[in-house]
Image (cartoon, rainbow, N blue to C red):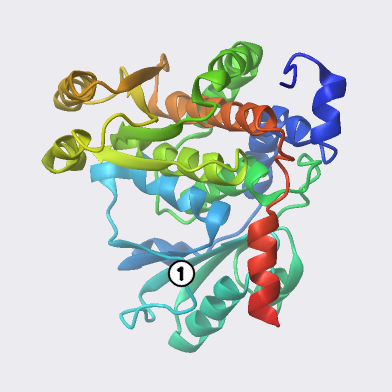
Amino acid sequence: MIDLNNIDEIKKLDPQDTLGSTEKMAEQMEAAWEQVQHVEVPVDYKEVSNIVFCGMGASIYGALVFKALAGENNRYPTEYVSDYHLPKFVGGNSLVVLTSYSGTTEEVLSCAHEAKEMGAKMLILTKGGPLAEFAKVNNVPSYIFDGALNPAGVPRLGNGYTIIGLLGLLSKAGIYEVTSEQIQEAIGVLKKRREEIKNWALKDAEKYLGKVPIIIAAEHLSGNAQILRNQFNETSKAFSSFFLVPDLNHHLMEGLQFPHPTNLQFILIMSHNYSDKIRKRMGLTADVIRKNNHVVHDITSEGSTKYVDFITILAYGCYLTLYLGLLYEQNPAINPWVDWFKEQLAS
């Protein structure tokens, strides 16, 4: 088994420097927040009646985080589209947010052209490619980043650009209220705790070797649950799933009885910033899982704010899934089956 403390061994499996990109997430966030402040967004964007986020895979992460952080304070009906077509309700009073790290994602480009035809307002986040060209030709307010702080060049390792960039754009548009102080405080905590979080994940990774991680979260960390599921899939090359409280309390608990035994490992993402009712539900959920003879791992954020929570848990998940992928002796940067599928689709 690989020695995760041996950098030379890691480099053999990680020639693209996935570890380097992971360690630069805080710097990506700093750069994205500063850069997006220079994007001009028309004042009438805050008058839209609904928002549609378009993105595939890691490019939808920012939308997931926004919806989770906004929670009950979200003033806008919100839809995610990870497909080729926009819903028919999209029109002149809609805001369509298009995110593609590469700028070449065909589903997002299809939605961009439909949004133009439907007369919707648009925001774009991308590193370049046809989507950046579309933004320039159509004068769409955009955050086009260089990706310099993502040496691996892997889209899902550019979270700092896409997630914080999106929060910044939505703030500039008057859609979402978040201050520079809130974002900078959270980034500062990540920078201060980076080695601690890294070592925490390093210690935990072996727990999930040969296991199926099942993630449970709630409220402002709901987006983190789906992101972590995706990271187990793509980075670790491992099957995973996620559920959200309180919804799972109405169905999943009865499904814990069979089959038995299993190799499920439940990850409960806990936070002191959850509401009282959700904290009670999370504790009781853990009790039910244990009473059904499954293993539960509590991952508790000690964040003082929901922004600190989401950023530190995001960083922990990036390190955890990277180290698990390395334990499986996989190159964490590549996605051979996704690439094969795209090649077959194009042929």
In the shown orientation, is residue 311 left or right of residue 157? left
The correct choice, above or below, for 223 with respect to 271 in the image is below
Identify which residue, 236 or 279, lies in the foreground.
Answer: 236
Query: Would you name the residue on which mark 1 appears?
Result: 96
Spot occupied by residue 167 in the image (x, y as percentages of width and height): 50, 46
Spot occupied by residue 89 in the image (x, y as percentages of width and height): 30, 80
Spot occupied by residue 269 in the image (x, y as percentages of width and height): 37, 26
The correct choice, above or below, for 220 with respect to 282 in the image is below
Quarter in which the C terminus is drawn: bottom right
At 33% across and 20% down in the image, what residue appears?
296
State whether residue 138 appears in this view: no
Quarter in which the N terminus is drawn: top right
- Number of marks drawn: 1
Extreme residue in the bottom direction: 117
The correct choice, above or below, for 218 with respect to 270 in the image is below
Provide the secondary structure element on which disc 1 rests: strand
The correct choice, above or below, for 181 with respect to 119 in the image is above
At 80% across and 35% down in the image, what residue appears?
14
Spot occupied by residue 311 in the image (x, y as percentages of width and height): 51, 29
Identify which residue, 272 or 153, lies in the foreground.
Answer: 153
Identify which residue, 210 or 92, lies in the foreground.
Answer: 210
The amino acid type found where label 1 is placed reads Val
In the shown orientation, is residue 6 left or right of residue 158? right
